[in-house]
Amino acid sequence: MSSHVLVVDDDPTITDVVSRYLTKAGFVVSTAADGPSALDVVRRTQPDLVVLDLMLPGMSGLEVCRELRATTTVAVLMLTALAEAADRIVGLEFGADDYLAKPFEPRELVLRVEAVLRRVTAGTVRPPSDVLSDGDLVVDLPAHSATLAGAELSLTAREFDLLAHLMRNPREALSREQLLRDVWGWSYGDESTVTVHVRRLREKIEADVALPRRLVTVWGVGYRFDPTEDVSAAELSQDPR
């Protein structure tokens, strides 16, 4: 069954070109020219991914992304102008799974869409026993779900992939460059993308974001996942009693 992609852009030329390339690549494509129309299409058709322009009339792409994150788990690929570095970071903070700067090659957009959707659906081809856990944090790869203390975590596809990758490599310091390559599939890119996603994950799995105990910063290197059992053992060894 073909994946469904919604293209949201108020420029009819961009919408037409992107739609034709995606259709040629085998996707079912819908389009919308503004935020309210996009949200209506999402509610009615539940697409697998939304290609979302940042600069939309009336309701901005950031507002649309925020609404999508509050109400759905649809993957989001955000289109931004090259000079809008700060807005790209904000887009990631709002929950976009990936971004692409304008002007872009349509073929690159297709490849980015395919890469995001592969990560979204990767869990369905893993063995049923492939479940990662650390105390009350459980990541079920086949179900593509994560829970903390029994409560479902609302993670974007990229947040889920990043958390799973870090948990698969406990106690190992991974550089931002490594994470971009292994999780995003990028041979180069803006490493602040990783920083933003780690911060978002900490907000969802750490009791105190200012003093993270699982997603630890390794200064000068990157990040490391420390299982809570390691923390407990270290605290116990320091108990003066």
Image (tube, rainbow, N blue to C red):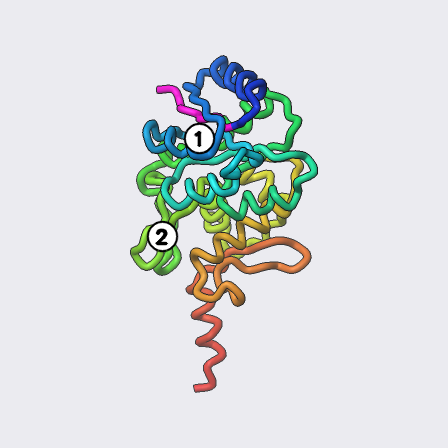
Q: Residue at x 42, y 46 (%)?
A: 155
Q: Residue at x 52, y 57 (%)?
A: 171
Label 1 or label 2, whichever comes before in sequence order: 1
* Quarter containing the N terminus: top left
How many residues crowd mark 1 within 10 Å: few (<14), some (14–19), many (20+)?
many
Please tell me whether residue 7 belongs to the stretch shown in magenta: yes
Please tell me whether residue 42 belongs to the stretch shown in magenta: no
Residue 11 against residue 124 in the figure, above or below: above
Residue 215, given in percent of the width and then of the height, sits at 51, 58
Q: Which residue position is annotated with label 2?
A: 138
Q: Residue at x 55, y 29 (%)?
A: 112
Q: Which residues are magenta?
A: 1-8
Residue 92, given in percent of the width and then of the height, sits at 54, 44
**Chief SS of the magenta region:** strand
Residue 27, given in percent of the width and then of the height, sits at 44, 19
Q: Nearer the viewer, residue 14 or 116?
A: 14
User: Marks 1 and 2, how far apart in space?
Assistant: 25 Å
Q: Nearer the viewer, residue 48 or 41?
A: 41
Q: Secondary structure at mark 1?
A: strand
Counting labels gives: 2
**Residue type marked 2:** Val
Q: Secondary structure at mark 2?
A: strand
Q: Which residue position is annotated with label 1?
A: 49
Left or right of residue 126: residue 172? right
